[in-house]
Amino acid sequence: MVNARDPEEVRVALVEGNELCELRVGQTSSGSLVGNIYLARVKQIEPGLDAAFVDFGERRAGFLHVGNVHPGYAEDGAEPAAVARQALPPMWQDQEEEEEGEEEENSAESAAEDESVDLRIEARLKQEQLILVQVLRDPVRGKGATMTTFLSLAGYSLVLMPTLGRIGVSRRVGEAEERERLRSVLEELGAGPELPVIARTVSAGQTRRALRADLELLKDKWEQLIHRAHKQTAPCLVYQEEATPLRAARELFHGGIREIVCDDEGVRKSLETFLTTKGSGEHVELKLHHTSRPLFEALDLESSYQRLFAPRVPIGKGASIVIHETEALTAIDVNSGRVERETLEMTALETNLRAAEEVLRQVRLRDLGGIIVVDFIDMREAGNRRQVEQTVREGLRKDRARMKCGRLGSFGLMTFTRRRLGTGPSKASEAMCRGCGGSGNIVHHRAGALRVLRRLRSLDSPSRVRLRAQPGLLLEMRQHRALVEALGHQLETVDDLQVPASDPVIELLGALATSEPPR
């Protein structure tokens, strides 16, 4: 379902039955930067972080860890375009693509085993050095975008990775015969050390013609990128990832898609071109939604989309999960509600199985990243815990993001990590609540008034003070007027609904003359 009629926000959903399974959201005002490639300039080297901050033209500098820095940049006079095409030493090529569409992880750990390799950030980069970088993760919660110098261009069935130096095949292509066929066909088409590519999972079964079309398209994109990098001045954008509808089609389209519904004629035509040029023979019905009623509402998807902004998600029979994001991790709590079975153990098992499926769906749809801790209902039997673990691991296979999963402990806690893809609802859709300061609880006005009184008592001499606070807090302060007057202060009050209840603004305007009576 492609909702592109409203240019302010483009939404693409993958739906099975009536259930929202995958989501891609793009906003014109604050679109995702993931996949964009920039000619950037190193602004600051931080040895203590083993990282550098780079100016790539956005308001906040990008973060570049030493593990994502190509060793070729350590050479004097290294040209960004030349380094971007330079194959990595074998020690850096220890993994093939695990998640379809993602760039290869070039692990610095294996390089550390070779004493001749200097992993210090100051040995790799210099101040004001020009480099080509690609955005791995969007800025989030005050942190800059995460960058890498290992560039990749994703097509429908192939990923071009100039630093790979060889042909790779996704590990999800399990059959050895098909893996060998893909390698052989790609070699015949000219892929290899000079044109390194990884065959994505969807390449399995693709014809020679389809693979050739994808390879030629990626080759043209790469040549245009290098040309721009030579002609422009840093910092600047040299390659922009495709628009949300086309990128979503590239990422989500597979052999099981039966129908695409779009509400914009221009986007429908571009999707039609995509289906034609990708070269595979699947028959997909492409429809235009032309009624005035919004697409997501017409297909009963809007309520599911709006639930992505709520902390509590129902999972049936009164049970629910509660999602709370912090800066370092996401905590998810499972509540049993009215689920009732023969025993408490069976009740916990049924609720946990329901919760496991919904947790993984919400993680994908919201594009949660970092450490995720799920607090399942405690179960005594090890077999039941293993059953929940198996449900979680099966659900993880549906997620394109790179993830690592732990065991379900005796306390009911299960931890996994997930790499954010930049595909969920934009964080610009949300703002911190000024009433609670992001805590989810509003501080009582009396507590705020006591904080003001403590500050007034701490002043060395009678002063003119301006208090900017919410009306409820100012009303509470009137109950303490006699105390303020006894302290000798002159208090001016200003109603301000924008000030958090927990953090009133106290401004000192100057000391009072001793002869000036308090007001």
Image (cartoon, rainbow, N blue to C red):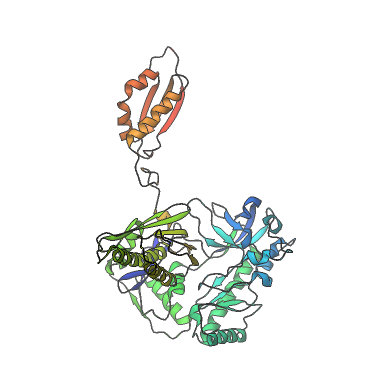
The answer to whether residue 86 is seen in the rendering is no
Relative to 410, does residue 464 appear above or below in the rendering?
above
Relative image position of residue 339 (x, y in whole percent): 26, 63
Relative to 295, 100 lies left or right: right
Relative image position of residue 191 (x, y in whole percent): 62, 81
Name the foreground residue: 405 vs 31: 405
Q: Residue furthest front?
A: 381
**Image quadrant in which the C terminus is located:** top left
Relative to 195, does residue 407 appear above or below in the rendering?
above
**Image quadrant in which the N terminus is located:** bottom left
Q: Quadrant of residue 182?
A: bottom right
So how many labels did they put on this image?
0
Relative to 276, does residue 308 appear above or below in the rendering?
above
Relative image position of residue 289 (x, y in whole percent): 31, 72
Name the foreground residue: 268 vs 141: 141
Relative to 79, does residue 469 appear above or below in the rendering?
above
Q: Quadrant of residue 487?
A: top left
Residue found 49% across the figure and 66% down from its top = 403
Q: Quadrant of residue 448?
A: top left
Relative to 508, 109 lies left or right: right
Relative to 109, 407 lies left or right: left
Name the foreground residue: 53 vs 420: 420
Relative image position of residue 190 (x, y in whole percent): 62, 83
Q: Residue furthest top?
A: 515
Residue found 53% across the figure and 86% down from its top = 178
Name the foreground residue: 268 vs 340: 340
Residue found 42% across the figure and 24% down from its top = 457
The answer to whether residue 144 is seen in the rendering is yes
